[in-house]
Image (spheres, rainbow, N blue to C red):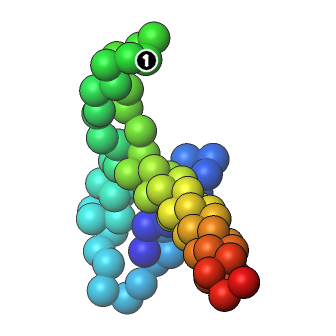
Amino acid sequence: MRVINKNETVQVEETAAVTGSFLESFLQSEPVAQKSYHELADKTVQEADAISQLHANLEMLYDLQTRYSFVMREVRYLLKA
């Protein structure tokens, strides 16, 4: 199994189904990266790890959801008054 953490290190746990040559090629492969275009940034073409980007997007989504929940609670309170 391939695990990529925030330090971009790759850890591989060997299983019975994994052959030696496959494991070697797996260890030599680069972490999953995706190039993206950011028009207003200083560096327009950036390469980011897909898993790290997913983690950041989920954190932002959770933050937005909690803010939305707070605003909706306040609106309901104001409508009752």
1 on left or right of 66: left
**How far across and how far down the image is residue 21, in percent?**
27, 62
- Residue drawn 48% across the image and 56% down it: 57
Number of callouts: 1
Q: Is residue 56 above or below residue 13?
A: above
- Residue drawn 37% across the image and 32% down it: 47
Residue closer to the observer: 1 or 22: 1
Which part of the image, by quadrant, shows the C terminus?
Answer: bottom right
- Residue drawn 38% across the image and 17% down it: 40
Q: Is residue 27 above or below residue 44?
A: below
Label 1: how many Cα within 10 Å (few below 14, some 14–19, many 20+): few
Residue 2 picture quarter? bottom left
Residue 78 picture quarter? bottom right
**How far across and how far down the image is residue 72, in percent?**
59, 75
Which part of the image, by quadrant, shows the N terminus?
Answer: bottom left
Disc 1 element: loop
Can residue 50 be seen in this snapshot? yes
Q: Is residue 72 above or below residue 55?
A: below
Q: Amino acid at mark 1?
A: Ala
In the current view of this chain or complex, which residue is farthest to the top? 42
Judging by the rendered image, the residue that carries numbered circle 1 is: 41
Can residue 66 be seen in this snapshot? no
In the current view of this chain or complex, which residue is farthest to the front? 81
- Residue drawn 56% across the image and 62% down it: 64
Q: Is residue 18 above or below residue 23?
A: below
Residue closer to the observer: 1 or 43: 43
**How far across and how far down the image is residue 70, in percent?**
67, 72
